[in-house]
């Protein structure tokens, strides 16, 4: 296949606006869904409708007329396509042949309609019946040590299916329940838990109505959570100041035209979002935060010296925190020259940003993958909390920490027990409820799973959604080792690469999409999801399913469990499948404080809040207080600078959802036509001796002498800090060493990958 050269245009238009309307039009044209889809979209993210399967952004109690964004519409239209990937398709193509296809072309085949079993004699997937699939999978699972099996979840399945999936794993005998969080916000789950005692953010949507400043780190709302642009726009109009830290000048953080406001659409009048936009170097946020804290301490000293009241909220610090003196010393000792070099930002800029923090009564800190996907990501989060604690910015309205979560129910899956960390699950309660002895040992994270597949100790991989093989680091080695597993099972709605790199026995089990009606013996069912603000929402699918032989995720999980495990009077798989309300009762019994009266509350407008102790200033940490922490490093990168070495950021376009590629346009960055591109700044192009349009390779420069390479990348000039490159996820994943991960949580370091350019 020839190389498609990208077209680079300088995108001067704001995020939102007519561009987003065109984006929706494009996918409607390609997927040709039934006209009823438009009706589905009008119910999306509203009480009684279905909750979008794209991102986990909050669903307001008072929604807009259209409470969906360009990407939410794409996600719905993508799952409601008219195209079908039937057994005939698999009859025409061997798996070896399909492995040569692009990810985009695989998903383009449409919805899977029939359970499929891999037949090695003909190297093809062949149709099978559900009971045959369940018993075939059960046979394999019964043959192996349960501790060598992995049950992965990607973050989309609702609370009910997720609860049963985790229960199935534990009844079968393991805690190997990694989910996509392990590649994403696990840094949050571990880092935030340590310092404030909560594994999730403390803000609710309404906090954005009253904050005075938003410190915004490494999250890209224009692409990844576009409905966030509305509260940001409203905040700016009230006078709130947004200070952005991001190596890339993301259009969505610069300016926005609200596509739902006719006057704005007609006049093109955009709102400037960021008050300051600081192009921090990748991994430079610890240093930048240190600079901000340094200025806060200095101004505090000056004001106290003048007889004023200082900047630091000493009453809060005294009553609610631990470790203040240690932080004060570390801040005092930090050197501005190091801060400037590592952050790539000038002292004057950082002081100006810190002045905004000092002046603001209420500050929210927002962050995403730009902080979590680094080797010292947990320390970044610790430092961000330090900044907030100095002025008591946690536990009062209009203030707090707000990690923006990814998959639509990724947070909820963790809440109801999909975790490899048994200490987060009420195992004794489960033991009593289901009359068994739950496994107590820690399960495997995503990185551990990959190591286990490489060393042969992992024998079976079951995945509830997702495309694990495409999403993980070290892809070439991982794909090569994948086939050594005895069993792979994928519960999916469309064909993806992960199905083609399979174990000796392999099944694909096609499921309903969330927007489709889920009819069971007890009638039409509702599922529930939890958003980034810990609000839980009922979701009702209304569209006719894409095929008669599809089953819901919950029915598939229950079917697998029933076939694999012995019969037991307390394990009522059929009853739970008939009525998901029965599963919500189990969830309520397991987590009564948060989920009491679950079914009665799930349609509360705006969702019901399951609460957050840190928001009430109850700190569930080791010391019982919020912890100030001192970073041990100023750079979050795992591999430092060296001549010729670049730090690669792997990024998302607005035409993809993770490994699902909707198209080849990255409109908001002015890039179009190809994803095999290398973004680099013009000075670095000169230093590296390359020019626009050259085709180059990237090779690993991680110092471990492993050869990793991605070829065929078109050099594309772009505004980036020196020494930093940009490329797309998942295309760049072969370059990420498996060992390059956050020290505390093992989240892969996908935003600081050490590489070298090869002409
Ligand atoms: N349309 C769409 N929506 C999505 C997704 C998608 O793929 N497509 N994915 C979903 C998922 S699972 C997730 S987790 C979220 C991800 O959403 P985000 O958290 O926004 O993740 P990314 O786009 O990977 O990266 C975020 C930003 O970090 C910046 N960055 C990179 N390195 C650094 C750094 O060292 N410091 C700082 N300060 N910034 C840095 C990048 O330039 C980028 O703008 O989105 C969800 N929503
Ligand atoms: N280099 C690099 N790597 C990364 C990242 C990065 O920023 N850079 N980001 C990481 C992050 S944040 C994440 S979350 C992971 C994502 O990793 P995953 O969650 O494993 O991957 P996805 O691409 O979201 O999964 C897509 C597949 O899910 C299936 N699917 C879609 N809808 C449904 C549904 O309703 N039900 C079921 N059962 N299946 C469905 C489809 O078959 C589709 O092909 O990737 C991580 N990998
Ligand atoms: Mo994610």
Image: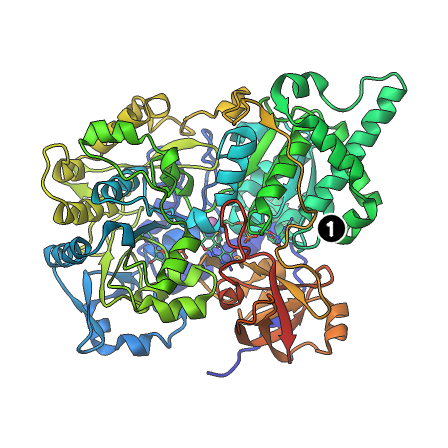
Density class for disc 1 (Cα within 10 Å; few <14, some 14-19, many ≥20) is many
Can I make out residue 211 in this image? yes
In this view, the residue in front, 444 or 750, is 444
In this view, the residue in front, 243 or 474, is 474
Q: How many badges with numbers are in the image?
A: 1
Tell whether circle 1 marks a residue whose Cβ is less than 8 angstroms from ligand 1: no
Q: Which residue is drawn at 72% across and 75% down?
A: 688
Quarter the C terminus occupies: bottom right
Q: Quadrant of residue 400?
A: top right
Residue 481 position within the rendered picture, expressed as x and y whole percent measured from the top left: 36, 68
Using residue 46 as the reference point, say whether residue 676 is left or right of it: right
Using residue 426 as the reference point, say whether residue 399 is left or right of it: right
Using residue 159 as the reference point, say whether residue 238 is left or right of it: right
Residue 453 position within the rendered picture, expressed as x and y whole percent measured from the top left: 35, 61
Q: Colour scheme in the image? A: rainbow
Q: Quadrant of residue 43?
A: top left
Can I make out residue 261 in this image? no
Q: Which residue is drawn at 31% across and 79% down?
A: 97
**Residue furthest out toward the bottom:** 2
**Residue 706 higher or lower than 638, as above or below:** below
In this view, the residue in front, 20 or 497, is 497
**Residue 18 higher or lower than 173, as above or below:** below
Q: Which residue is drawn at 79% across and 30% down?
A: 297
Residue 485 position within the rendered picture, expressed as x and y whole percent measured from the top left: 28, 64
**Residue 573 higher or lower than 33, as above or below:** above
Residue 437 position within the rendered picture, expressed as x and y whole percent measured from the top left: 22, 35
Q: Name the residue under label 1.
A: 343
Q: Which residue is drawn at 61% across and 20% down?
A: 320
In this view, the residue in front, 271 or 422, is 422
**Residue 477 higher or lower than 53, as above or below:** below
Q: What element carries label 1?
A: helix
Q: In which quarter of the image is residue 680?
A: bottom right
């Amino acid at each position: 296949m020839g190389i498609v050269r990208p077209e680079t245009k300088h995108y001067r238009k704001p995020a939102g606006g007519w561009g987003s309307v065109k984006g929706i039009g494009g996918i409607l044209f390609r997927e040709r869904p039934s006209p009823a889809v438009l009706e589905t979209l009008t119910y999306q993210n509203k009480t009684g409708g279905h909750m979008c399967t794209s991102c986990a952004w909050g669903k307001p109690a008072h929604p807009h007329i259209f409470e969906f964004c360009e990407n939410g519409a794409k996600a719905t239209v993508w799952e409601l396509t008219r195209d079908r990937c039937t057994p005939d398709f698999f009859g025409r193509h061997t798996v070896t042949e399909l492995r040569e296809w692009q990810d985009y072309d695989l998903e383009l085949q449409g919805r899977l309609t029939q359970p499929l079993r891999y037949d090695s004699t003909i190297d093809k997937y062949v149709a099978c019946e559900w009971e045959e699939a369940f018993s075939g999978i059960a046979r394999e699972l019964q043959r192996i040590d349960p501790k060598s099996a992995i049950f992965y979840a990607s973050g989309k399945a609702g609370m009910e299916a997720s609860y049963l999936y985790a229960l199935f794993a534990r009844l079968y005998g393991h805690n190997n329940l990694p989910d996509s969080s392990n590649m994403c916000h696990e840094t949050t789950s571990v880092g935030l838990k340590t310092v404030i005692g909560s594994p999730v953010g403390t803000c609710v949507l309404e906090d954005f109505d009253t904050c005075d400043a938003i410190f915004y780190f490494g999250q890209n709302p224009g692409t990844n959570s576009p409905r966030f642009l509305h509260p940001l726009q409203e905040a700016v109009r009230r006078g709130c100041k947004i200070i952005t830290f991001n190596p890339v000048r993301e259009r969505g953080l610069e300016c926005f035209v609200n596509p739902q406001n006719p006057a704005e659409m007609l006049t093109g009048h955009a709102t400037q979002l960021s008050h300051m936009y600081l192009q921090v170097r990748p991994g430079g946020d610890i240093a930048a935060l240190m600079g901000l804290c340094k200025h806060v301490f200095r101004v505090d000293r000056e004001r106290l010296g003048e007889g004023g009241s200082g900047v630091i909220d000493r009453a809060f610090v005294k009553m609610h925190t631990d470790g203040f003196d240690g932080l004060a010393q570390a801040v005092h000792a930090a050197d501005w020259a190091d801060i400037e070099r590592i952050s790539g930002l000038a002292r004057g800029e950082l002081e100006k940003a810190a002045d905004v923090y000092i002046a603001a009564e209420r500050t929210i800190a927002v962050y995403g993958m730009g902080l979590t996907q680094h080797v010292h990501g947990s320390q970044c989060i610790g430092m961000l909390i330090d900044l907030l604690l100095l002025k008591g910015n946690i536990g009062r309205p209009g203030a707090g920490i707000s990690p923006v979560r990814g998959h639509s129910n990724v947070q909820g899956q963790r809440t109801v027990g999909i975790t490899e960390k048994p200490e987060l699950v009420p195992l004794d309660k489960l033991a009593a409820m289901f009359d068994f002895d739950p496994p107590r040992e820690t399960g495997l994270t995503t990185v551990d799973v990959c190591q286990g597949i490489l060393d042969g100790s992992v024998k079976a991989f079951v995945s509830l959604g997702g495309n694990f093989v495409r999403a993980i680091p070290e892809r070439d080695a991982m794909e090569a080792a994948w086939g050594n597993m005895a069993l792979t099972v994928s519960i999916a709605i469309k064909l993806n690469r992960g199905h083609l790199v399979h174990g000796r026995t392999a099944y694909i089990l096609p499921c309903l999409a969330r927007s489709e009606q889920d009819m069971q013996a007890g009638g039409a069912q509702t599922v529930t999801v939890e958003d980034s603000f810990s609000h839980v929402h009922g979701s009702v699918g209304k569209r006719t399913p894409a095929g008669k032989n599809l089953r819901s995720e919950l029915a598939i999980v229950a079917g697998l469990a029933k076939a694999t495990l012995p019969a037991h009077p307390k394990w009522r798989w059929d009853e739970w499948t008939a009525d998901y309300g029965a599963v919500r009762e189990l969830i309520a019994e397991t987590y009564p404080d948060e989920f009491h009266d679950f079914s009665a509350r799930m349609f509360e407008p705006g969702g019901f809040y399951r609460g957050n102790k840190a928001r009430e200033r109850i700190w569930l940490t080791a010391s019982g207080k919020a912890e100030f922490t001192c970073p041990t490093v100023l750079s979050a990168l795992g591999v430092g600078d060296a001549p010729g070495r670049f730090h690669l950021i792997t990024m998302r376009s607005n035409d993809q959802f993770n490994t699902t590629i909707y198209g080849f346009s990255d409109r908001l960055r002015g890039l179009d036509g190809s994803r095999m591109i290398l973004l680099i700044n013009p000075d670095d192009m000169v230093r590296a001796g390359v020019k626009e349009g050259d085709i180059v390779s990237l090779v690993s420069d991680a110092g471990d002498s492993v050869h990793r390479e991605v070829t065929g990348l078109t050099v594309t000039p772009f505004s980036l800090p020196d020494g930093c490159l940009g490329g797309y996820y998942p295309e760049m994943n072969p370059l990420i060493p498996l060992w390059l991960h956050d020290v505390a949580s093992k989240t892969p370091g996908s935003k600081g990958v050490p590489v070298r350019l090869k002409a």
